[in-house]
Amino acid sequence: MANVKEILQRTPPSVLYHYTTQEGLLGIIRAKEIWASHTQYLNDVREFVHATELLTQELSQMETEAGADKVKGECLAEMEKVVSLGLETVNVCVCSFSEEGDVLSQWRAYGGKASGIAVGFSGSFLRKMSEQYGWLVPVVYDREKQRWLVRTLLGDSLDESLKSIREGNSGVSNLFEYLPRYAPILKHHSFVEEKEWRIVTRPLPCTDERFGYRPGGSMLIPYFRLPLAIQEEGSIKEVVVGPTPYPKQSLRAVDGLLTKHDIPTSSLISQDVVTVRSSEIPYRNW
């Protein structure tokens, strides 16, 4: 899996932004944690459908290429079963970030009714934090890059199954082990404006003390509480206050919140202070 694993090791940008509501900001600062939602309960219901379609198409092509090779055909059929079963029962959670801190579509989607917040975290801080629970990975939007990733993943998985058979073992597909970490980063190209990175967790037991359930719009949402050591200097680089009818008051309130929780927004001693600024987008939703 050397080629595919490279995407899990890419260096993140210096700052990655998490768009949230005022309530979300309070949770991040007070509880020192950020929530990662179960992949099957995200806003975009087609996310895993898109990944499944890509996998199914490539498997079909690989079966055609296998021709009369019976062993290879049986391995591919086993892989098809894995894809068709889906990942609904696997507790993989994702937390989303963007390379951009002031994007209209993000304010509309995640900022709430007014004055949403974009918390700009240090990319290196997020990478270090995520390693304990999973991976910080860029989302892939380009169709050809997606096909390459899927084809490489399937090809490597097939090679491992064939090797297992040659060594006298069962040759059962190991695809199910790899899908949870790669399927969540394949999104339709129409979302490319988001420039998204995600923390993708390893499969989680529902008995984990940090795994829980919260009320959603129409059902309970499983989620995982990722701990944030925001007291570390430089963990948060800036906070962007979204469009609001009261920009000056909003800035002062956010500045005060951070100061109250020992996160410096101005200092004569420390260079790692948090910048608090307003969105420059002329968007009105109040």
Image (tube, rainbow, N blue to C red):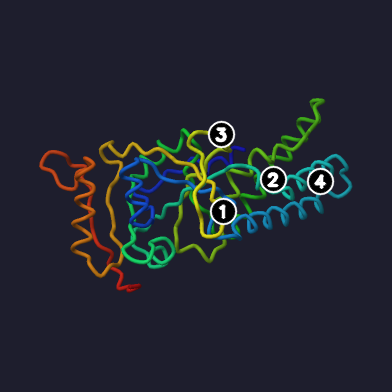
Q: Residue furthest left?
A: 268
Label annotation for residue 154: 2
Local SS, label 4: helix
- Spatial CA distance of label 4 from label 1 is 28 Å
Q: Earlier in the sequence, mark 4 or mark 1?
A: 1
Distance from label 3 to label 1 (Cα)? 19 Å
Residue 53: quarter of image: bottom right
User: Residue at coordinates 34% horizontally, 62% vertically from top-left?
Assistant: 102
* Picture disc at residue 77: 4
Indicate which label's residue lies in the foreground, 1 or 2: 1
Q: Going by the image, does 279 lie left or right of 160?
A: left
Say few, some or many: other residues with alpha carbon within 10 Å of mark 3 (under 14 / 14 to 19 / 20 or more).
few
If you read the primary sequence from the N terminus, does the residue marked by circle 2 or circle 4 appear first?
Answer: 4
Mark found first going from the N terminus, 3 or 1: 1
* Cα distance in 3D space between marks 4 and 3: 33 Å
Q: Amino acid at mark 2?
A: Leu
Q: Residues within 10 Å of mark 4 (few under 14, many from 20)?
A: some
Query: Mark 2 or 3 closer to N-term?
Result: 2
The residue sitting at the top extreme is 168
Question: Where does residue 156 sit, x and y in percent of width and height?
Answer: 68, 40
> What residue would you read off at disc 3?
207
Give the left or right position of residue 161, taking residue 131 as reference: right
Which residue, given by chain and number where applicable, does mark 1 sit on? Answer: 41
Q: Secondary structure at mark 2?
A: helix
At mark 3, the secondary structure is loop
